[in-house]
Image (cartoon, rainbow, N blue to C red):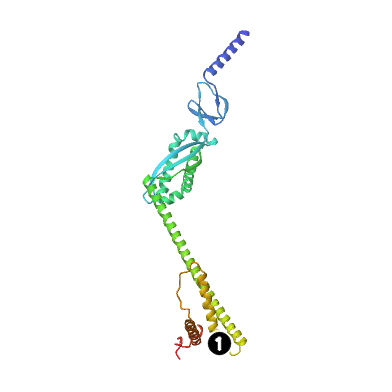
Amino acid sequence: MFEGISVIVLVFIVLFVLMILGGSFFTVNTAERGVVERFNKFDRVAEPGLAVKLPFIESVRKLDMRVQQVAIPIETKTKDNVFVKIPVAVQYQVLPHKVFEAHYKLAAPQRQIEAYVYNVILGHVPKMDLDTAYESQQDIALAVKKELDSTMETFGYLIVKALVTDIIPADKVKNAMNDINAARREQEAALAKGEAARIMAVKNAEAEAQSKKLQGEGIANQRKAIIDGLRESVETFTQAVPGSRPEDVMMLVVMTQYLDTLKEVGANAHSNTILIPHTPGALADLYSQIRNAVLVGTETAKLTPPPDAMPPGGQRPSGRM
């Protein structure tokens, strides 16, 4: 009896050693799945952790479940015949519930993804000019992802992200684009400077016109004040001195203004030497000229109608009596 038990124990020990030597125990990492084949035929999927397989009968192949990335440089031309390089990055991973499809249906997933990316890029970019291609990078990336989603899912792969990272034309094209943009900026700057100069010129002209208008109104008001003052002086003098004539008063006023002018000229250190007649006869002459000018101005004012008083024919009167 004891001999039978010893034989059984010996058999178990031999089997245990054979299992160890044959690699019956194996582990699967967290980011992996194990594909167990029995006689090279799919049997089951081993989840992460410790697992057992039949020695010499079953074999295990491990599949990476992490997100992987493939970079695909593509060269094509745009609608305006500019050759560009478009680097595309595609991120993908195996679907946990489609390990069988990912392992057996597709031998080289990266080559398959590259072929579909080429197909999408060459179907979109040649229909766009260079500027539109720059503006449509996001749309191109979405088109790539959409095409890959519908295809790669049947092979057990999930497309996480498709990125069009850049659009790179030739160096000559870049330099030409920079020159065009620089010229455009300079043109806009020149237009802005010209507009600013025009506005400044208009504003200066308006300010000068307003200044001259105010200056003319000031001179007119000054002359009006002088005339009113002279009239008051004449009236006061004739009332204070019985028998006096307006001509005598005007002569006195002119004499006073003449002497005040000489005083101001002499008091100014920066004035030049001025030679003027200052005899009583010269004063009479000066008075006569002022009187004649006042009379002529008065007669002219009487004969000239106001601006809004136009005759029916649309012509102003000539002013001749």
> Outermost residue toward the right?
1
Q: Residues within 10 Å of mark 1 (few under 14, many from 20)?
A: some
* Residue shown at 60% from the left, 10% from the top: 6
Split into 4 quadrants, where in the image is the N terminus?
top right
Residue at disc 1, secondary structure: helix
Q: Residue at x 58, y 80 (%)?
A: 229
Specify the quadrant that holds the C terminus.
bottom left
Q: Which residue is at a point 53% across and 84% down the rendered structure image?
A: 251
Q: Is residue 294 left or right of residue 180?
A: right
Does 47 appear above or below 169? above
- Residue 311 versus residue 294: which sits nearer the camera? 294
Q: Residue 198: which quarter of the image?
A: bottom left
Which residue extends farthest front? Answer: 279
Image position, residue 242 (x, y; %): 61, 89
Is residue 216 something one can see in this rendering? no
Judging depth in this view, the residue of 30 and 281 nearest the camera is 281
Residue that numbered label 1 is attached to: 246
Q: Position of residue 166 (x, y in %)?
A: 45, 44
Q: Return the residue nearer the eye: 194 or 23.
A: 194
Q: How many marks?
A: 1
- 263 above or below 141? below
Q: Position of residue 252 (x, y in %)?
A: 55, 82
> Can the viewer see residue 178?
yes
Q: Nearer the viewer, residue 309 or 177?
A: 309
- 34 relative to 269, above or below: above
Above or below 219: residue 145 = above
Identify which amino acid the numbered label 1 is placed on: Pro
Q: In the rendering, at what x and y percent does residue 39 appear?
A: 48, 25
